[in-house]
Image: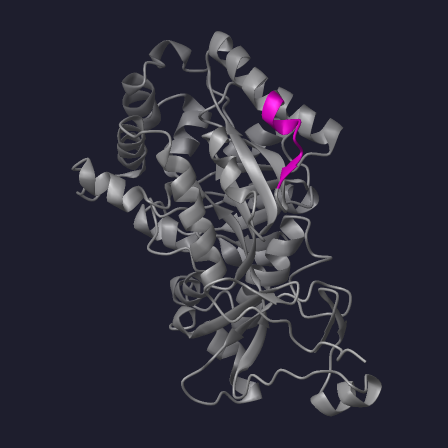
Amino acid sequence: MLNRDGQIAAVGTLAEIRNSYPGVEVVDFGEAILVPLLVNAHTHLELTDYPAWAAKAGETDAPKDFVDWILRLIRVKRRLNRKLFEKSVAAGIERLIRSGTGAVGDILSHYPSRTAYRKSPLLGTLFLESLGQDPAVIQRIRKGLESVLSEERIGQIELGLSPHSPYSISATYLSSLYKKCRNEGLRCTTHLAESQAEVEFIENSSGELVTGLYLTIGWESLVPWPAECSPTEYLRRRGGLFPQNLLVHGVHLTSADIELLAEAGMHLALCPRSNARLNVGKAPVAGLLKAGVKLALGTDSLASNDSLSLWDEMAFAADWFDGQLDAPTLFRMATLGGADALGVDSELGSLSVGKQGSFQVLRPETKVALRDLNDYFIAPGRTEEVEQVFVRGQAQLGVAPQRSFFRRKKP
C-alpha cells in the first residue's frame, strides 16, 4: 500500500508498488496484518468512566431489568460533577483509537463535553441527544441545541441530532426534530425497539416505563395516549424513517417492521453485548439480512458493556447470533457498514485507492493463512493484537512511533 499526502495512492504487492513508484521509502511491518480502521456506529463516550462512578455511588448490583438499569444510570449521573463528562469522553476517544477504531457515532447529552473532540482524529458524527415531554422544558432545550448545532462540526467530527427514543420524547418534538434533520441535511440517530418495555409503552402507554421511569422522574402527568402500533410504525408516522436517521438496537422488530426499514433504506446499528448485558433479547438478524436492511455494529457505552472494542463485539456477536452473522458479514458491519451509516465511506471502511491512508496493524501470535483470515478477524483476542494505528499516514501518539509509511524519498 502506497500513501501520499495522507491518502492511499496504490494497493498491491511490494514488487508491484516499487515497480510503479520507484524510489518509495518502505516501512516493513514484518509478519503483521494491515486492516482498515473499524467504525463504531453507536456509543455514548461520556459514560466511559461510568463503572467507576457507579462503584463510588454504591450502584454495584446487577439491574433487575431494562427500566431498573435506566433509573440507576439517572441516579449516578445526577450525583456527578458535570466537568467529569469531558474527561470521560476523552478517555473513550483514546480507547477507541487504541482498539483500531477510526470513526464513531457518538451520542452526547452534556453538550459542553464536545470540546474533547477538538484534537481527536476520529471521523463520524457526534449526535447531540435531546428528549423531553414537557413543552416548556422542550422550548428551553431546543435553544441550547440550536446554538451548538450552528457550529456544524468540532475537530474532524460533524454534529448531528439524536432524538433519544420513541418513549422519551413527545410526538410533536420528535416530528419537529426529524423535519429539521431532513430539511437541513443533518445526520440523526434514534434508539429503536430496544426492549419489550418500549413496545408495551408505545402500543398501550403502560408497563414499567410508566410505573417505573415516568413515575420516578416526575413525568406521570405526561404519559402520552396509546399509539396502538409498534415503535417502528410510530417512527414512520413521525417522519423518522429516512436513510440519514441511523437506528440503533432493533431487538423487538416484527416482520412488518423489518419490511418498513428495508423499504426506507434504513441503517441499523446492532449492539449485541449491551443487549445481552441488559437481557432485552436478540435482534432478528436473519430477517434483517434477508430483507436487505443495512447493518452496522456498535458497542453502546461502558454503562452496559465491558469494552469499546469492535473486535470484542464481533467475537461476541459471532457466538451470540449462533452463526447467523458469518465472518465476512460481521467484518463488513464493523467497517464499510458503519462507514456507510455515518457517511464516511468515501474515506474509511476499506483499504482502497483514494481513501484515507488510515489503518491498523495487527500482530497475531501465530501466522494466519489467507484462507483463515475472516475467521481470525471474529475470533476472541484481536483487541490485544492491535499494535499500531495510523490515521492519514501518521501513527497515533502512544500507539506507535510518529512516522509516515510508504513515503516517497526526497530527491
Q: Is residue 43 above or below residue 98?
A: above
Location of residue 315 (image quadrant): bottom left
Q: Residue furthest right?
A: 20
Q: Quadrant of the N terminus?
A: bottom right
Image position, residue 405 (x, y; %) = 65, 75
Residue drawn at 53 percent across, 75 percent down: 361
In the image, taking residue 177 as reference, residue 7 lies left or right, namely right
Q: Position of residue 49 (x, y in %)?
A: 33, 44
Q: Which residues are magenta?
A: 147-154
**Residue 292 visible to the viewer:** no
Pick the front one: 124 or 196:
124
Image quadrant where residue 179 sits: top right
Instruction: Give how far across and how far down residue 381 sits, in percent.
Output: 38, 73
Residue 30 picture quarter: bottom right
- Say whether residue 394 is left or right of residue 97: right
Figure colour scheme: one colour
Q: Is residue 398 visible?
A: yes
Viewer-nearest residue: 395 or 379: 395
Q: Is residue 298 above or below residue 318?
A: above
Residue at left offset 42%, top offset 23%: 204
